[in-house]
Image: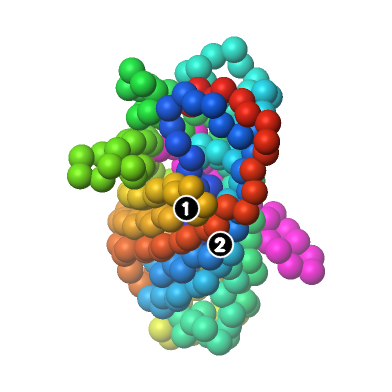
Amino acid sequence: MRLFSSACVVLGCAAQLVSGAAAAADKPLWEAGAGLGVMHLPAWRGAAESRELVLPVPYFIYHGRYLRADRQGVRGVLFDSDRVDLGVSLGASPPVSKDSSTARAGMAELDATVEIGPQLDLTLWRSPDRASQLKLILPVRSAFTLSSSPHHAGWVFSPAFNLDLVDPPGLAGWRLGLRSGPIFATRRQHAYYYQVSPTEARPDRPAYTASGGYSGTQVLASLSRRYPRHWVGAFVRYDMLQHAAFDDSPLVARDHYLAAGVAVAWIFGESSERVNVDD
């Protein structure tokens, strides 16, 4: 299953955590860097097994006139509006081998997947200095397997409220992000992770046919800080699968759990050209 939704899968988490300063300021046109992140995650949403992953974390900020890549993700500036943004939502999940899960013993391995699609952001509130803001984010992503014969793995819709706070009480210099919302997915997406065919069934794993619909709710908190030459960030996510369309699948062992991660990135270079940025 997607190990991060909206914004918290391998790619989505990096986009969620990587952040620059928030208020209007004169900034480099671009900044680039790289680092590493360590994450504790379930093998798939609802799996009994967990894993620790060490992953590369890209750091890239771009303040172009029509294209921007920053703490809000990758987005095009298509509207003459400071309340509406149309961007790109990204997600990914690592593979699950047949030897790493007893629940899937004898079943086909899960290939790594990548998700991509549009995301509409609606700004509902922002502070007078524009540093803190509340948004309704509406991402729709299409999933594909990364294998020798890639195939479509369904669609995911994960609307959420996203609150960004700069310099929260007791945390001067830090950015706190809070995000919460439900997830919905098509039958094909649920079937990829939770369906059990008759040939894969056994006494402790009955056959199961997945359906589309509600996929649970996620609550995510992230904390990050930009230093002159490096950036640090962390996140914790609580996943609730009660009443999800697949909660009676034999491949669901837990209906709630925590996932977490920390990351650090070093900033290697920046543009000599400066632009005025008003987030």
**Gap between marks 1 and 2 measured at Cα:** 9 Å
Structure colour scheme: rainbow
The image shows residue 278, relative to residue 166, as above or below, that is: above
Q: Is residue 140 one of those drawn in magenta?
A: yes
Q: Residue furthest top?
A: 80
State the residue in front, 142 or 85.
85
Q: Residue at x 60, y 58 (%)?
A: 34
Whether residues under marks 1 and 2 lie with C-beta atoms below 8 angstroms apart, the answer is: yes
Question: Amino acid type of disc 2?
Answer: Gly
Q: Secondary structure at mark 2?
A: strand
Query: Any mark on residue 35, and which?
Result: 2
State the residue in front, 257 or 166.
166
The image shows residue 219, relative to residue 119, as above or below, that is: below
In this picture, which residue range is highlighted in magenta?
A: 138-160
Residue on which the image places disc 1: 231
Q: Secondary structure at mark 1?
A: strand
Instruction: Tell me residue 26's x, y (percent).
Output: 54, 26
Specify the quadrant of the image occupied by residue 87: top right
Instruction: Tell me residue 182's x, y (percent).
Output: 38, 43
The image shows residue 87, relative to residue 269, as above or below, that is: above
**Residue 12 visible somewhere in the drawing:** no
**Residue 253 visible somewhere in the drawing:** yes
Label 1 crowding class (10 Å Cα cut-off): few <14, some 14-19, many 20+?
many
Question: Amino acid type of disc 1?
Answer: Trp
Q: Is residue 137 left or right of residue 134?
A: right
Q: Residue at x 37, y 63 (%)?
A: 260
Q: Is residue 199 one of those drawn in magenta?
A: no
Q: Residue furthest left?
A: 170
Instruction: Tell me residue 176's x, y (percent).
Output: 33, 43
Instruction: Tell me residue 214's x, y (percent).
Output: 42, 47
Q: Earlier in the sequence, mark 1 or mark 2?
A: 2
Q: Residue at x 59, y 80 (%)?
A: 97
